[in-house]
Amino acid sequence: MPLTLCLALAVVAQTTIAADSESARASYTKYEYRIPMRDGARLFTAVYVPKDTTQTWPVMLTRTPYSVAPYGVDAYRTSLGPSEHFMKEKFIFAYQDVRGRYMSEGTFVEMRPHIAVKRGPKDVDESSDTFDTIAWLIKNVPGQNGRVGMSGISYPGFYTAAALIDAHPALKAASPQAPVADMYMGDDAYHNGAFLLPHNFSFFTRFVERKGEPEKPKQTLSFEYGTPDGYDFFLKMGPLGNSRKLLPGHAYWQEYLDHPTLDDFWKARSIVPHLKKVTPAVMTVGGWFDAEDLQGSLSVYRAIEKSSPGATNMLVMGPWSHGGWAGKNDGDRLGNLHFASKTAAFFREHIELPFFVQHLKSKRDVKDVKDVKDVKTAKDAKDVKLPEAYIFHTGINEWRRHDAWPPRGATRRSLYLGAGGRLGWDAAPAAGGTEFDEYVSDPARPVPFLGYVAQAMTFDYMTEDQRHAARRPDVLVYETPVLEGDVSVAGPVGVTLHVSTSGTDSDFVVKLVDVYPGDFPAPPSPAPAAGASGAPVPQNAVKHGGYQQLVRGEPFRGKYRKSFERPVAFEPGRPETITFTLPDVAHTFRRGHKIMVQVQSSWFPFIDRNPQKFTDIPGAKPEDFVKATQRVYRSPARPSALTLYVLR
């Protein structure tokens, strides 16, 4: 891209940001408060109040560990609220630095444990901090109507979920979006006992402890990898414990490596068991291609559905990466996939806004169209009928409304791994021939999770073509014949593997794949993305004829097959059973496609390497890493299969 064009684009971008900021300044007045908590700590909160005083407004609160900048009553955010529609619709917007971050007092605790029984003012958690914040806001902020809503993505999604516990009566609606819910069981830290290496490493090079008193954000931290090749970087790093030398003195990273099992440290940090007797209306949002907190959205929805059957509890799942529905993203494409519509824009206008308007704005807040500009949006939003589950089904690329999730009427059916790489709905036939498939897994040559070079975990890795893996000898591949009709699946994917290993520990990665026909038309070429220097970044141009689309994939660390609390070694050569669940899908395998299952024992560096010797992996030594022969059984006595919720 010519330098002159880069400069022109930069000027346009800066002008747009300035215009957005001026728009907020024109319609809102900013205030800054230090709100006292019950233990005396004061939390920094920026509040934007509409200049329009002809009516009262609900409060939209977001609590974050990532800074509420810009600081200063004369410095305005470039946008307010969950989307552009909220700023036009008008709410009071409140943004808070959580305890111990940036300008708020106190000590920050990562995923601060919830205290179920509080015995005094010193017993504080995110639930109590939110309660105290809301109580202060509705007493001290002018122009509010006594109703509060909350929204947040990722870590702020965790704070939104925590607010639902013993919620303040004024909290009427909350939307945890891609919430971190259980760091060990499927969110950012561990997946079925396997550690998400590049994701956490990249995050903690930038997310560090605040030393001393409250302070404004400093210059963004960076880490020099020395190579764009993350596979090569982490392989040369050696055993996981060597990462401590690369992040010396990093308390949060140290904690993650010190707790590789599901111990009290992780149990205390799960918000899921505490989501009981929920009274606010809840709309949990997630993305089918969320590389970080897909499980969190599903866990929060299910916990509330189980413990609070009378609550308004809604689930929205779209074809998005982590937070890909927010900002100004259209949501019409991701990585290698095209969704045929602007899914994110649709969500923001037709799902998210109506949810909050309906629960936060009463009829008296919606005046006649002639009286208040833009009020027609609120009138329309009041009439939208939102379902229990608003789900985007990939493969056919359409939104569907369900009155339950998984949908009522879905039938559980099993796909069995068979001889000769066959995959079918019928169980394995009676004895005859070899009853297992095997491969050699070598930690020195782990299976990459991408077919191209990338430094860290890519946000769109879930759209990655799996042909690079299918061609390796250490990956087992099973597939159906060409489908004669559509197969639509909706819900969690169960896995049962009968396996053995010549080692004493092994990982087993299971991937559900959609195989496109060879004559599938090529998608339009993506526009080149601008890198940090303004130069175009080459895109991963995938040929869709024969494309092997990853629909869902998860690892399982074998030593946790009996318990995540107490790992157990394998006896070499002895068959064992591993059962686990892949996060939900809503996908249609179209007529002419094939369904594929891949099984492998590494997925690097997305998950850390298993030495294949039973040991404390963060403390493993180079000599602990050994080759192992893995067997996957598929006999009538030991059938290996995936169980799907199939729609009629």
Image (cartoon, rainbow, N blue to C red):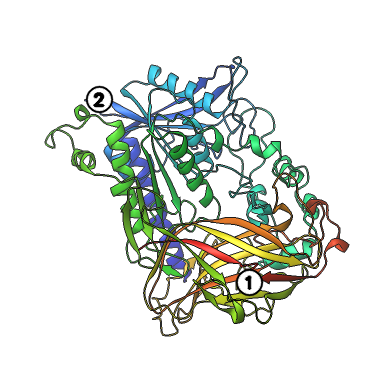
Q: Is residue 615 left or right of residue 449?
A: right
Q: Position of residue 22 (x, y in %)?
A: 34, 41
Q: Residue at x 58, y 48 (%)?
A: 187
Circle 2 is placed at which residue position? 53
Which label sits on residue 634? Answer: 1
Which label sits on residue 82? Answer: none
Q: Nearer the viewer, residue 222 or 6?
A: 222
**Which tag, 1 or 2, sits closer to the chain's start?**
2
Element type at mark 2: loop
Q: Position of residue 570 (x, y in %)?
A: 78, 59
- Residue depth check, mark 1 versus mark 2: number of the one nearer the observer: 1
Please state which amino acid type lies under the numbered disc 2.
Thr
Which of the image's four quarters has the C terminus? Answer: bottom left
Can you tell which quarter of the image residue 4 is in? bottom left
Q: Is residue 534 visible?
A: no
Q: Residue furthest bottom?
A: 519
Can you tell which quarter of the image residue 590 is in? bottom left
Q: Is residue 645 visible?
A: yes
Q: Nearer the viewer, residue 430 or 451?
A: 430
